[in-house]
Image (cartoon, grey):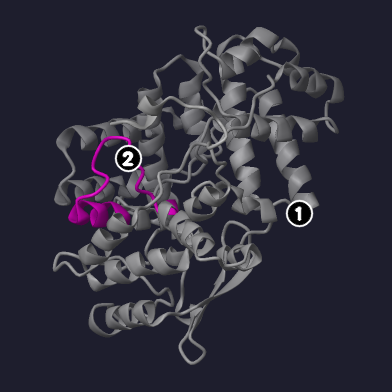
Amino acid sequence: MDLQNLKEHHEELLSFMENNGYCSTYIHRFRDEINRILADADSHRWQSYQDIYLEYLKVPHSKDYLRNKRTIIGALEQFDLFGHFPDGRHRHTLFERGSYHLLVPEFQELIDFYRAYEVQRGKKESTIRGESLNTASFLYRMQEQGARSLDEVTEDAVLSFFVSDDGTLQKSCSYKKNISAVFKAGLKWKEPQCRRILGFLPLLRETRKNIRYLTQDEVRLLRDAAENDGFSARNKAILLLLLFTGLRGCDIAGLTFSSIDWEKERILVEQQKTSVPVEIPLSAVVGNAIYDYLAEERPDTGSLRLFLSETHPFSPLAAGSIGNIVAKACRLAGIRQEPGDRKGTHIFRHNLASTMLENGVPQPVITQTLGHTAPDSLEPYLRADFVHLKECALSIEAFPLAEEVFSL
């Protein structure tokens, strides 16, 4: 591993951090790590910055300590190999998120086989990643309990991952399904070991939480908040898109100029979740809000993305920022401010679906509007269709009841 560039230029990195307000303790940690790497390079056969970090795993350390080392070593990698200085925006790429890099070789081999197998079968990358992350966490727990191979995983260890000692469910049915998907693929790799662990996975009932739907009063207050002077034109356009289109937050963040067909008054989107294209009417209220943002507020950066950050360098808006905009709207509207109140972007998607149901819009039309790939995806929204649910209510006239039941 060639560390000559780091040796010659690391003072530039430290000076940059000093000039940009990094605390002295943090800078000192960087200096110590650089000195350690340069001093120990000759006595180790490091091939990459990953190898440098993995050296720390040979001795027990706390998660916080290891997280700190990953951040520092990852930042050094970005500086040494790519010339990137820390900016608070770009996360290091030393490892993917999750526990994979902490696993013993056999556990990593299982996940590697699963990923290659499902890529060949055409499974969506986001699904593969989610199932891999969940399984890596599961295997890391098995490893913490002493298992260094699949043969050493015990049924008690598996059950303790899902259910606590007092019987409380710790992991959901969908989490178990993700783990199961990896081990089912693993049957073509190490059939007996993977089948054995599949047999240990508990039977969990699939449940759905009740969705706290938006009330008409909340919708009115949110629309009023969109007109607040403290709410930017960009945020107003995004809030109205959520209210009137049912688009997911990630799809709104991914909109480009070509996504808006002004002549035909349509919004064209290929959904990130399903890769299914959808075409949504562009209403006047949404179109006017987008136009106001483009004409009055959006900086001209050359980016094709529709929505940009509001501060320099005006980068394309991240999907996570859509949730922050919703949180701000709720604050201005004075709604959903108690701990645990649901105020994510999905409540708007649910609101659109339930409103369309109440107004008698055919279910296939709603499914097409929301871009669902399966008809039963609409089922959770049916529970909030109170207009039609009331039509299913049975009369109690045939049941004898005492008069005091109805008295105040």
* Separation of marks 2 and 1 at Cα, in angstroms: 38 Å
Q: Residues within 10 Å of mark 2 (few under 14, many from 20)?
A: few
Q: Earlier in the sequence, mark 2 or mark 1?
A: 1
**x and y percentages locating residue 136 in the rendered image:** 60, 30
Q: Residue furthest bottom?
A: 263
Q: Is residue 9 above or below residue 69?
A: below
The magenta segment: 325-346
**x and y percentages locating residue 371 in the rendered image:** 60, 64
Q: Residue at x 31, y 78 (%)?
A: 289
Q: Is residue 235 above or below residue 379?
A: below
Look at the image and tell me whether residue 289 can be seen. Answer: yes
Circle number at residue 122: 1
**Residues tagged 2 and 1 counted as in contact (Cβ below 8 A):** no
SS category of the residue bearing label 2 = loop
Q: Is residue 27 above or below residue 18?
A: above
Image quarter for residue 195? top right
Circle number at residue 341: 2
Q: Residue at x 55, y 71 (%)?
A: 269
**Left or right, 384 with reference to 203:** left
**Left or right, 56 with reference to 14:** right
Amino acid type for the residue under numbered disc 1: Gly
**Left or right, 111 with reference to 339:** right
Q: Is residue 264 magenta?
A: no
Q: Is residue 333 magenta?
A: yes
Instruction: For the C terminus, give its image quadrant.
Output: top left
Foreground: 187 or 62?
187
